[in-house]
Amino acid sequence: MANANFAEKKLKVFGISFIFVLFFVSMALAGDIKEPKFSGQFYPDSPAELSDMIDNFLSQAKPEPMPSDIFAIIEPHAGYGFSGQAAAFGYKLIKDKPYKTVIIIGTSHSYAFNGVSVYPQGAFQTPLGILEVDSEFSSKLLDKDSEIIFDSQAFSQEHSVEVQLPFLQKTLSGFKIVPIIISDSPFLLCQKLANLLKGAIADRKDVLVVVSTDMYHGYDYEEAEKTDNLTLSYLKNMDAEGLYYALRDEKAQLCGGFGVVTALILAKDLGHKKLQVLNHTNSAEVTGKKVKGTWTVGYASCAIDKEGESSMLNKAQKKRLLEIARKSIETYLKSGKRLEVSETDPVLTQEMGAFVTLKERGELRGCIGNLVGKQPLYLTVRDMAVEAATADPRFSPVELAELENIEIEISALSAMERVDSADKIQLGRHGVLVRKGFRSGVFLPQVATETGWTKEEFLNNLCAHKAGLAADAWKDKDTEIYIFTADIFSEKEVND
């Protein structure tokens, strides 16, 4: 009997070993297993130590819940001792979700190339095990564009994809990965990659996108805060094009910025419109060395949910309002009379506040609006368009010859909501009205994106320069604070 039990145990061991051999052989046949390059550097090479470290990060992370499943997360890729706790916020939200394919978009730190490299097949190894590449998904991206290829050198010494893998192994199961490295790329290539990803995802609901990026890099702690706040405002607004050119102009900083731009384009194309910043910190905060001259790197964990915020207006309604605005300005400049127009659309006939903004070759040319709807939306837009063109005291009236060079942007406003604390304000999402006595002032949501102010700077400027109050009047209990959201759209956006 003892010999029989021993033989049975040997058979079981042999069977398990044989399964592992078959697995590794199959991986070898499908493609090489890429061994980790940065275990023991960016994260522990001991499986037990690595597992315990990530468990501790996850237990400490308390992200604000989101209303629906997550489509994408944006995660830092520094050493775990610096950015691991921030990264855990996003991974905590996706824990145990039934994703089957995880697209990981990293950036190239050590190998200079132009374009995108997609890993085609095989597997990646970490101290926690093997992750198989989703070769079927990768094949839908390759051989479609001359700038989207497989270049093995892009991955050979790159940590941005690798450091995400242990977190994925600790939070998900039964999934495959699609590793992508995007290097220096024009905006058009980000759009091309997003379009290919959209086609490959199709109507699947079991795909997660992970974008790997750090934020500010430099020697000024205060500058790190200001720069990261500007960068995050673009993210909160899901403004892919604005972010791209802010990165090019070095106003915003993301070392994996082109991956983020691609993810924003992709998310919006698939109807996902809400990005939430789950955690933001930097190396100075983590180490406690908030001293000018100390190298500082910013870290943020963000999530884009699948539900998103629904727009108040559909594309046809937006297009109609923009047509009314342009025709209204043209009619007034030619005849001095208001445009005669009527509408039956039940949304456009609702009483709603709106601002009309005019830009000439990218520069502000006029902006006037009503915060509270006193007439149907389409008439508010008609009238505010004329006011923006002729009555903004900061500018001379628009001339008819200028009109063809002017782009019109409309902000349709939600109802005002009074809040009891500035903590309720989300920069880049909320417009804000402050009122004390007979004085008041307002900033639209996009002001945060355009300036990169911190919340305190935003409110100080609102009080001092718009309301004529003391800069810190927003802290006074007698000052009323109202927030609102805006459906913001321009001719360029609607006509694309």
Image (cartoon, helix red, strand yellow):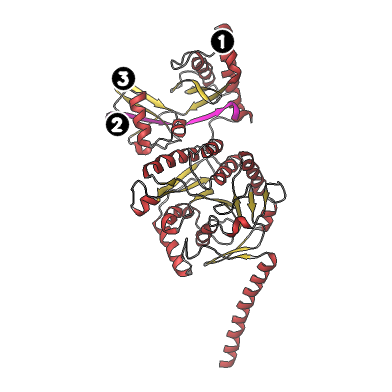
Element marked by disc 3: loop
In magenta segment, residue 376: no
Q: CA distance from mark 3 to mark 2?
A: 17 Å
Task: Report the amino acid beneath label 3.
Answer: Phe
* Place of residue 449 in the rendered image (x, y in percent of width and height, measured from the top left): 46, 34
* Place of residue 333 in the rendered image (x, y in percent of width and height, measured from the top left): 56, 10
Task: Report the amino acid beneath label 1.
Answer: Leu
Task: Report the amino acid beneath label 2.
Answer: Asp
Classify mark 1: residues with Cα within 10 Å, few (<14), some (14-19) or many (20+): many
* Place of residue 355 in the rendered image (x, y in percent of width and height, measured from the top left): 48, 23
Screen quadrant of the C terminus = top right
Q: Earlier in the sequence, mark 3 or mark 1?
A: 1
Which label lies toward us, 3 or 1? 1
Q: CA distance from mark 3 to mark 1?
A: 34 Å
Q: For residue 454, what is the image quadrant?
A: top left
- The circle drawn on residue 438 is 3
Q: Earlier in the sequence, mark 3 or mark 2?
A: 3
* Place of residue 356 in the rendered image (x, y in percent of width and height, measured from the top left): 51, 22
Name the residue beneath numbered marker 2: 472
Residue located 51% across and 24% down the image: 363
In magenta segment, residue 482: yes
Residue located 33% across and 26% down the image: 464
- The circle drawn on residue 333 is 1
Classify mark 2: residues with Cα within 10 Å, few (<14), some (14-19) or many (20+): some
Screen quadrant of the N terminus = bottom right
| Residue at the extreme left of the image, as rendered | 477
Element marked by disc 2: loop
Element marked by disc 1: helix
Instruction: Answer whether residue 69 is visible to the viewer in this image.
Output: no
Which is nearer the eye, 12 or 252? 252
